[in-house]
Image (cartoon, rainbow, N blue to C red):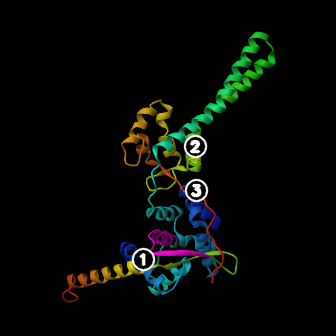
Amino acid sequence: MSRELKRGTLEMVLLALLRERERYGYEIVTELEGRSGGAFEMKEGTLYPVLYRLEEAGHVEAHWRTQERGVPRKYYRITASGEAELGRQVAGWRAFVSVMDVMLGEGGEP
Amino acid sequence: MKTIDDYVAAVSRHLPPGFAASRGVGAELRDHLADRMLAGDTEAEAIARMGEPSEVAEAFLAGFRMRRAPLPRRAAAFLVDMALGLVVVVPLLFFMFQAIGFWEETRALWFGVLALLVGGVAIAALVLGVVYFPAAEAIWGRTLGKWLFGLCVVNESGARIGWKSAIIRRIPFYFEFFWIDAVFAFFTRDRQRAFDRVAGTRVVVCEPAAESPAGPARG
């Protein structure tokens, strides 16, 4: 999968994962790689800036929780604003896929 | 990049002062790397998966708009830095000339030696004053005056500057055309002096460093 395509859809995919339940960074990375069959493999450190942008935009919120081994871990969960943003992005993506199907001769009218 | 601590420090070094600490970047990266190692990676493998520190730092900064430093605060920070220099150098020069005066009157050897010693220290202080600005900005991202007023110097992407940029932006001070250079700050969008534009730097408001926001256990 091209880098631009991954970059353009990463926020949407992250919001979709967080809609299922709250998660922490490493868990998100392994979930992304596992579900996509490696298509969403990425430099793992670059995940956090995307999460921080979503947090700054109010689409996710974060809280710290201390683990059994005494190390604090930051968990992310989607907000109402994030749900709305996810809905908007998914609608936009589906519309885009429909148009591309038509352009590539794969489907009917958009 | 030998250890997790080295990696986290390398990422933080590319970020403006206080940025990493205020967002718990270090704690989060460490936790992630520890999880990788628990899953079976060696420390080196876990670090390799994270990406180059500069790449990760640039990604952090890509989504953040840093507020440009208000001109009055920049001016105040500059005055504080200049006052520091005067407070150190002026008394030294005063004592040096006093010692020279006493030596001329008395021809006592120890006054001459004292004048030489104090003069040497004054010259060293002057030299330090010349390198103070670029050194402080290259090493810590800001001078003491900027630190007092919550400002720092970053490059166009928001990352810390290096020695080359720190020296270039100081050239007007060394060749005494600072006032012409400073006028540009009134007309550029990011309040950049002319040599800030040449060096690709800007002065911004830096957030104060805060403790890692690791909170109490919940649920």
Three-letter amino acid code at disc 1?
Ser
Dot label at residue B187? none
Q: In the figure, is residue A75 to the left or right of B114?
A: left
Looking at the rendered image, the quarter that the N terminus of chain A falls into is bottom left
Q: Chain of mark 3?
A: B
Look at the image and give the residue range highlighted in magenta.
A45-64
Q: Chain of mark 2?
A: B
Q: Is residue B114 magenta?
A: no
Q: Residue at x 57, y 62 (%)?
A: B20
Dot label at residue B208? 3
Residue B145 can be seen in this image: yes
Q: Main secondary structure of the magenta part?
A: helix
Residue A84 in picture, x, y percent from top left: 39, 80
Q: Residue at x 70, y 79 (%)?
A: A69
Q: Chain of mark 1?
A: A
Q: Secondary structure at mark 1?
A: helix
Of all residues, the one furthest to the top in this rendering is: B105
Residue A10 in picture, x, y percent from top left: 42, 76
Residue B10 in picture, x, y percent from top left: 58, 60
Residue B2 in picture, x, y percent from top left: 63, 65
For residue B90, above or below residue B17:
above
Q: Which callout, 3 or 2, points at the residue further toward the start of the chain?
A: 2
Labels 1 and 2 in the same subunit? no
Three-letter amino acid code at disc 3?
Pro
Q: Secondary structure at mark 2?
A: helix
Q: In the figure, is residue A108 to the left or right of B67?
A: left
| Count of marks placed on residues | 3
Dot label at residue A81? 1
Quarter where residue B181 is shown:
top left
For residue B175, above or below residue B73:
above
From the image, tell me which residue sits under label 2: B145
Three-letter amino acid code at disc 2?
Gly
